[in-house]
Image: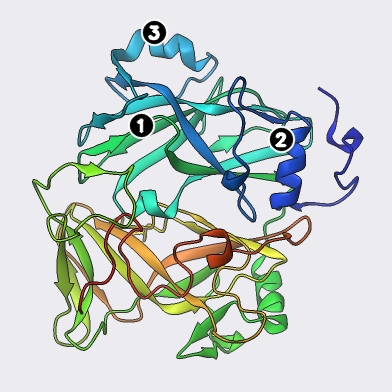
Amino acid sequence: MAGLHGASGFPRNGRGVLPGQLIERAITAGYVDAGRFKVPPENVQPASLDLRLGETAYRIRCSFLPGRDPVEAKLEEYTLDEIDLRRGAMLEVGHPYLVELKERLHLPEGLRGKANPKSSTGRVDVFTRVVTDRSARFDEIANGYDGALYLEVVPLSFAIRVREDLTLNQLRLAIGKPTLTDTEIREAHERQPLLYRADRPVPTDELVLSDGLFLGLDLRGDGHGRVGYSAREHAPLLDLVRSGEIDPEPFWDPVVRERGNRLVLSPNKFYLLMSDDAVSVPPDLAAEMTAYDPTSGELRTHYAGFFDPGFGFDPAGGFRGSRAALEVRAHDVPFMIEHGQTVCKLTFERMLEPPDVLYGPTIGSSYQRQAETLSRHFQRDRGA
């Protein structure tokens, strides 16, 4: 495979995340290929590509990393059953499945990838991560990787119905090391605010930074003290093929804060909460919400990750930022969280060039200016 610098239409020098128009060129150049299946243009996002489930899911007896082997070799050893996804099928709670994705990669030297669950996937507590041949890491696609992509899928709260072509995760392609340092994040925030509180830019000296930008938690909630939702036990089947049609009541319980704007998380229960701060990602940057685990090891937040350029950003100044939905789970013991507590972290990366189209309703984005934590699969006109 020729080096990246020999590819027509790609910058010869630089580092950054590929925007949508360069992802399209990567598809045309054959770096991203779907064999007999064409990559749908609508799956190209401002800084990522939605990846599609293939025709077959393999129920496996355990999660694994292939190490020095191809994934297929491990599947022969660990597969318990094969499930046809062409007409849809149910995946059970707590069981791992592996699905070969329709998209394959033939990356030139200099181009690498990273995968993350889509926001709608994380919000229904479906754990996903990409596995590649001869790899010792999940979700990291090596520089110059040539081969298939497999998605591990584990429903954690609800049994789910999926089918071929459903998109549960996303791919981001990048050249070099585009991650911003804390100093660069401060400088970017001074040029164009990245974080707002009460509709005003957070003062630069009040940013909480440590290899990324920390966000505070909203535990004041609405007029009734509701701060989010928790997943119900023994819920009915959740059909992920449907969108915006499902009554949330059988799946979610409202969560109400305690006096003092605090909340005790029950062990291993899944919560959907909201950040107090509003995020704005300008056109020249992309962001990723990374899992934050305090040194106590008692809390896990945010299983889904990518924030594309334009999230919470309005060039006309009509609004300032969008709050982030947070997927939260305590581990072994009840854990107290309080309003404003830092529970998640954003890392920022520079774009190779700004995308032609930004995140927002014009491309069908679901979570711009969101005031609700529920995923797009659910009816979202519930009263507070």
Residue type for callout 3: Glu
Tag 1 or tag 3, which sits nearer the N-term? 3
Secondary structure under the numbered disc 1 in the rendered image: loop
Q: Amino acid at mark 1?
A: Arg
- Height in image: 117 above or below 276? above
Q: Quadrant of the N terminus?
A: top right
The CA distance from mark 1 to mark 2 is 24 Å
Please state, as top left, top right, bottom left or bottom right, where the C terminus lies in the image: bottom left
Q: Is residue 175 visible?
A: no
Secondary structure, mark 2, is helix
Of labels 3 and 1, the one closer to you: 1
Mark 3: which secondary structure? helix
**What residue did someone put label 1 on?**
163
For residue 27, the mark is: 2
Estimate how packed mark 2 is, as few (under 14), some (14 to 19) or many (20 or more) residues with alpha carbons within 10 Å.
some
Q: CA distance from mark 3 to mark 1?
A: 23 Å
Locate residue 83: give its quadrant.
top left
